[in-house]
Image (cartoon, rainbow, N blue to C red):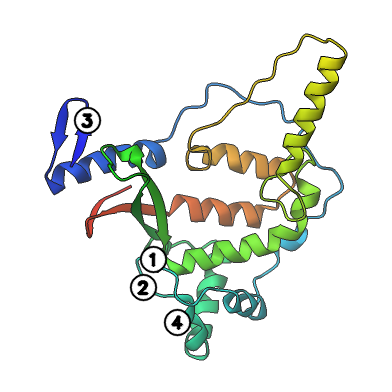
Amino acid sequence: MYQIGDQVLTSQMDKQEVMFEYYDGLLGTEQQRATTLNLQYFHRAGIDLSSLDDPITEDEVWEMIKTLPADHAPGPDGFTGRFYKACRPLIKSDFMAAIITLQQGDTRKLWLLNSAFLTLIPKKAEVLEAKDFWPISLVHSFSKLITKILANRLAPLLNSLIATNQSAFIRRRCIHDNFILVQQTIKALHRKKVPSLFLKLDISKAFDSVSWAFLLEILSHLGFGSAWCNLVANLLSTASTRVLLNGELGEEI
């Protein structure tokens, strides 16, 4: 049972429609940019990112596959890490051919390998609205493996690319450092009797609602090569998602 205002929804069709509208508005609707940013000072000079555009090698793929969990929930294709490890000798030539094709910019039929199911986990015992669920994206294994390879390449460069005041999700950095910095700053201002205002912003669904155009603009400004940016753009533009509710799939987002 779901509820919209005073209206109670009980049918599968009505529930699927509510979920589609909610997540299509969140994931599938492009927002018009009302402002632009001056990126003049948002730059990390002297960082060589050319290696990110190198062709993906078979050894690189295998090293990534070895780290995959064996039996995590699969995406639409049903393939798990166990499958890729066990069947590597049989599929490696076809898999590498698909990667080479993608790196060459050929995105024909990529949408078939870039879909996802959105499964919903209740946040609490009684759920009445779409926002009462945690959305978990089960992505097609091919696109998931490609993005993991890209992430593995990028990881060693993040410390140089990301300013030191950004501490979340960066290896060898601790998110608690920023809390300590804020505490020390408040104490110093209080001791010096300086009138101050501290503002904490929490952007709802920040990673889900980021503008693709803005993301690519930032990557280009930071010096990422055209091959890398094109690969990211192609993965984004061919992606699709369908909400999985009570074992049934909704409309494509």
- The amino acid sitting under disc 3 is Ile
Q: Are circles 2 and 1 on residues that touch, CB within 8 Å?
A: yes
On screen, 47 above or below 86?
above
Spatial separation of the CA atoms under disc 2 and disc 1:
6 Å
User: What residue sits right under mark 4 in the picture?
Assistant: 83
Q: Which is nearer the eye, 120 or 14?
A: 120
Q: Earlier in the sequence, mark 1 or mark 4?
A: 1
User: What residue sits right under mark 1 in the picture?
Assistant: 75
Q: Which is nearer the eye, 156 or 115?
A: 156
Spatial separation of the CA atoms under disc 4 and disc 3:
43 Å
Callout 4: SS: helix
- The amino acid sitting under disc 4 is Phe
Please provide percent x and percent y for residue 175.
Answer: 70, 44
Q: Earlier in the sequence, mark 1 or mark 3?
A: 3
Q: Are circles 4 and 3 on residues that touch, CB within 8 Å?
A: no
**Residue at 71% over, 58% down:** 155
**Residue at 57% over, 53% down:** 232
User: What residue sits right under mark 2 in the picture?
Assistant: 78
Please provide percent x and percent y for residue 63.
Answer: 64, 78
Q: Earlier in the sequence, mark 4 or mark 3?
A: 3
